[in-house]
Image (cartoon, rainbow, N blue to C red):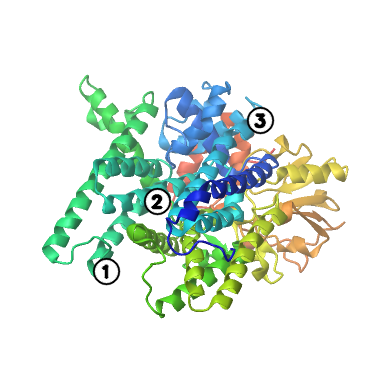
Amino acid sequence: MSNDMPLLNGKSSMENAHGARYSIVAGLLLLLMAMLAGGAALRESVTIDEVSHIGAGVSYLQKFDLRLNEEHPPLTKVLAALPLVLRGTRADYSHISWTISEKFFPAYMGQWVFGEWLLTKWNNPVTTLAWARLPMLLLTLALGWVLYVYARRLGGNWGGLLCLSVYVSMPAFLAFGPLVHTDVAVTLFSLVTLWRFAEIWQNPSRKSAVLFGLSLAGALLSKFTAGILFFAFVAFALSTRWRAVPGQPVAKPEARAWRRLRWRAALQGILWAAVAVYVFYFVFSLNQTSDVLYRLGHGSAAVPLRRLLLPPWLYLRGVLMVLISASRPTFILGHAYPHGVWFYFPVLFVLKSPLSFLGLLALAVALALKQKGGEKVNDPTIPSELAIHWRVLWVALIVFTGFCLLSRLDLSIRHFSVPLALLMLLLAALPRMVERFRLSAPTAARLVGAGAGVLALSCLFTAVRAYPYYFPYINALSLGHPAYELVNDSNLDWNQSLPEVKRFADQHGLQRIDLDPHGFDDPTVTVPQAEFWDCQKPTAADDGQWAVVSATMIMDDHNCVWLMRYAHQTLAGGSMYAVHLPEHIPAAGSLDGPPLPSAFRNFAGAPFDIQVLLLDLVRHPEKLPQAMQEIQAKFSSPNKSETQTPSGSKAN
């Protein structure tokens, strides 16, 4: 931030004259992000959720049937599948993984097998994955551009560039942005929805209502947790009762009429969103059976009614699935918990954010507190015409963060994407706060401005230095502790590092390598030398062998800290570890040996080894009917075994 930064007025002639230059810089920053995020993604294998998402998306476009992956809305999967379908990606709809998946529970199991076969058996896995990730990378860049545009309006050209610099260098967005999943899409559409909601309260026109409705539909079609937006809308409206926004009448009768007019426009927008969501679900479920609504009858009048009611049924069933599965075991700071804990996301945010970003947030808070207690100035930090937008963003940040703190499903920094983007956007005010500081302390303001500029550049430097290993990124606040002692799940590894295992095995000339990955798919597609292995259950055949274990399996999804007592190397920046096993592995329960069965842990806290089961089904899909019967019987039995795998499945 230079000293000739334009003062306070966001519409100054200097900003307007040089706006194009700032946009060019913004374009270059987004190009850097495309190179970093896209380059990293090209080096990575398919992640866990992508297996089901990619297969489901292709089936939506080719069959107009939403049977697979109902637990997530279809929009992002459709976008990812567009280039695949246009390129003629093949899917075998006579395969048992598809034909058995008409009902909800079989489809939940079948989606993993169908997705794996689509990626690795029916098509080239490398090119299929790359083309599926391209639309997601474009969505990530679109989110960056939206952040820049909104931040520029809030804080001028420098505010826009500051926010964009932080965004393009954030390891979380660099890691997850190009992947076929829902969090970046819901963040993009949520941000646009919040902005459009503010537009309605500023100008409740028909156009504002339509644009608000379409953006809300995009959010609702991206992820079911977009429903949190409705709580943000209500919270903002309530905030106007105790603190007025610009343009709000003072007298209570006029204020009620003022709010009523805006709520009417907002409800019109919500109606537009409902129609858009319904149409999307209706079109892409045209060929899906409506037998689930059999209670409505089978006659000539009932069948059309069932078809009309199927879209809301599918959407509500997906929401119900999210609510049912919204509690999972978690792990943070070396401790396992049976469900999410309130401090999970605050700790994760501090550990996985670049220190420079945390410094910018601290600087912004310090300046805001100082100026709040100082003399009043005529020109506000945020232009008065955007005061409603600023209020909406702040309220939404509080609401979304509150839901994250209360969540019992604590798995990944990606679930904190919306608050993360809102925090970045609120940094837009920092350059103007520095300029206001110059009015009272010019020298100190120059130092603060220079410091802010250095911190922004440091964020970019951190991103370049961490390339291409953004998944396991942890800042210096780890105090030297390995990441697997601090965080869990896709904060470390999401099965993306298999190419690194292949390179390691090739470099060491290994014909066999034991592999305990964080995934369900067949690792031999990427690592032909791999033998699927449970690090908790070594045998005499493993004596003296090289083994590779996912960082998430060391203390979280498995219990394998014992491996770290032997010579090991980090792979993929700490996502995985290669361990040279001793010539004679000590007995289970001994000081340097594997754990006793009583201390075993299963992937995702499942009551049986779901990894072994799904890998066996991928290799032997004909076992799907029997496996599903046994799983249903297992969960309905009052005496549930905690470790036995259905069908006695083995990863052979």
Residue found at the far left of this picture: 253
**Residue 56 image position (x, y, % from top left):** 50, 33
Amino acid type, mark 2? Ile
Label 3 residue SS: helix
Label placed on residue 324: 2
Label placed on residue 127: 3
The quarter of the image holding the C terminus is top right
Q: If you read the primary sequence from the N terminus, does the residue marked by circle 1 or circle 2 appear first?
A: 1
**Residue 147 image position (x, y, % from top left):** 48, 51
Is residue 291 depicted above or below 429 in this figure? above
Q: Toward the viewer: 247 or 577?
A: 247
Badge nearest the viewer, 3 or 2: 3
Left or right: where 26 falls relative to 207:
right
Residue in the image at 24% along x and 48% along y: 204
Is residue 307 depicted above or below 615 in this figure? above
Label placed on residue 77: none
Spatial CA distance of label 3 from label 2 is: 36 Å
| Quadrant in the picture for residue 102 | top left
Q: If you read the primary sequence from the N terminus, does the residue marked by circle 1 or circle 3 appear first?
A: 3
Q: Toward the viewer: 454 or 301?
A: 454
Spatial CA distance of label 1 from label 2 is: 38 Å
- Residue marked by disc 1: 243
Amino acid type, mark 3? Thr
Is residue 549 depicted above or below 51 in this figure? below
Residue found at the far top of this picture: 300
How many tags in the picture?
Answer: 3
Spatial CA distance of label 1 from label 3 is: 55 Å
Amino acid type, mark 1? Arg
Q: Mark 3 packing: few (<14 Cα in 10 Å), some, or many (20+)?
A: few
The quarter of the image holding the N terminus is bottom right
Q: If you read the primary sequence from the N terminus, does the residue marked by circle 3 or circle 2 appear first?
A: 3
